[in-house]
Image (cartoon, rainbow, N blue to C red):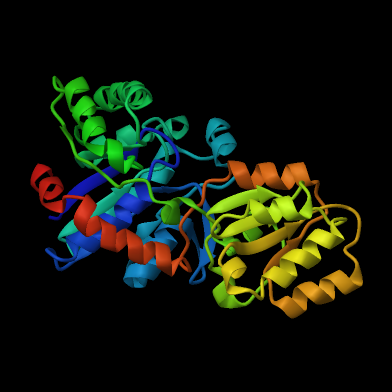
Amino acid sequence: MSKKIFIAATGQDCGKTTTSLSLIHLARQKYKRVGFIKPFGPKLIAYKGRQVDMDAALISHIYGLDDDLEYMSPVVVESRTTRKFLDGEIKREQLLFPLDHAISVLEEKCDFLIIEGAGHAGVGAVVGLSNAEVAARYQAPVLLVTGGGVGHVIDSVYLNLAMFREAGAEVRMLVPNKLIPAKREATLGYLEKAFAAHPFTVIGGFNYSPILADPTLRHIARLLGLQLHARDEQSLRIAHHLQMGAASTQRVVDLLQPSTLLVVTSSRDELLVMLASLYHIPEFKSKIAGLVIPGLAPVAEIVLRILNDAGIPYMRSTATTADVFSRISEDVSKIGPEDCEKISLIQKLAETELCFETIDALI
């Protein structure tokens, strides 16, 4: 029988997958057989001929767990799953059977098993299997991941604790992520005070990292559904800043920051040509990650030739500049299998910022 831990979160984008990636990396230094399962897969992709959750595919790809793939994503949630369940076309038992089987197999095969939930404690309640209920069903101690900060973290933790308590699941660890380095100790200190009466331990997670938080050009192209004109190595460049190319040409250049993605409307020929010219200069090449060129007006043929000759990465969209800018601004970058720099950094940071010995002792 393996050791189990359920990775939950107070909401989306707190860092569950980053935490799972880290725990597998650290657990493998102690345990021979480390497994992973995403009980309910809300974000499906095709991987190795199967429809599986993207997090299960990511973990399988990074850690070579393809032999266990059928158990790592036992229940895939499609767009009509909720309606089918409410209409009586899908029964709770139909979802439980593959889940129970997958957990049983992985418990036998593994010394250490990570069960990653989806979203907050209540996700899945519509089919009678919330994250809290799944954690309780398999008697897996809960590690609850939160964002950084104090006030809103305390509020969101209390909301989630109520559901875990009602389901009979035991929260043993609280792991705040995306901590501001200068405020890390103070933040953890306040959270320890806030939850001093509760039977769980506050463990510091990851500090905020622009490399982990910011998107690659390839991610942005997928987000916008655009073709990315770039070499493979350029497509993996991380855009740390986003800038609207709406000011004068000189002003736009003056405002450039390291690894900036510029949104420049298709009618700004002079600005596009200037940026393409600057891309040849090392000082500016480090500042220009790439371009998104929105707008209904066609880009002049000569401008496209200049962009292509310069080798500057770009994407072309017919959407409005405001729409493109807002979609990129509001997006939270998810880690993908091709994000080697991010994955390597996560594994490196895990060894200094996440105390596996403490986590392991609390399971």
- Work out whether residue 227 can be spotted: no
- Work out whether residue 212 can be spotted: yes
Quarter of the figure with the C terminus? top left
* Residue 16 in the image, given as x and y percentages of width and height: 36, 46
For the residue pair 130 and 210, the one nearer the viewer reads as: 210
Q: Residue at x 57, y 55 (%)?
A: 257
Decide: is 348 above or below 223: below
* Residue 335 in the image, given as x and y percentages of width and height: 46, 57
**Location of residue 347 (image quadrant):** bottom left
Left or right: where does residue 350 sit relative to residue 54? Answer: left
| Residue sitting farthest toward the left | 361
For the residue pair 55 and 187, the one nearer the viewer reads as: 187
| Residue sitting farthest toward the bottom | 309
Decide: is 126 above or below 248: above
Q: Residue at x 90, y 61 (%)?
A: 298
Q: Residue at x 39, y 41 (%)?
A: 14
* Residue 249 in the image, given as x and y percentages of width and height: 77, 55
Decide: is 105 above or below 200: below
How many marks the image carries: the answer is: 0
Left or right: where does residue 28 sit relative to residue 91? Answer: left
Quarter of the figure with the N terminus? bottom left
* Residue 323 in the image, given as x and y percentages of width and height: 74, 43
Q: Residue at x 65, y 53 (%)?
A: 254
Left or right: where does residue 296 sit relative to residue 32? Answer: right
Left or right: where does residue 74 sit relative to residue 333? Answer: left
**Location of residue 227 (image quadrant):** bottom right
For the residue pair 238 and 72, the one nearer the viewer reads as: 238
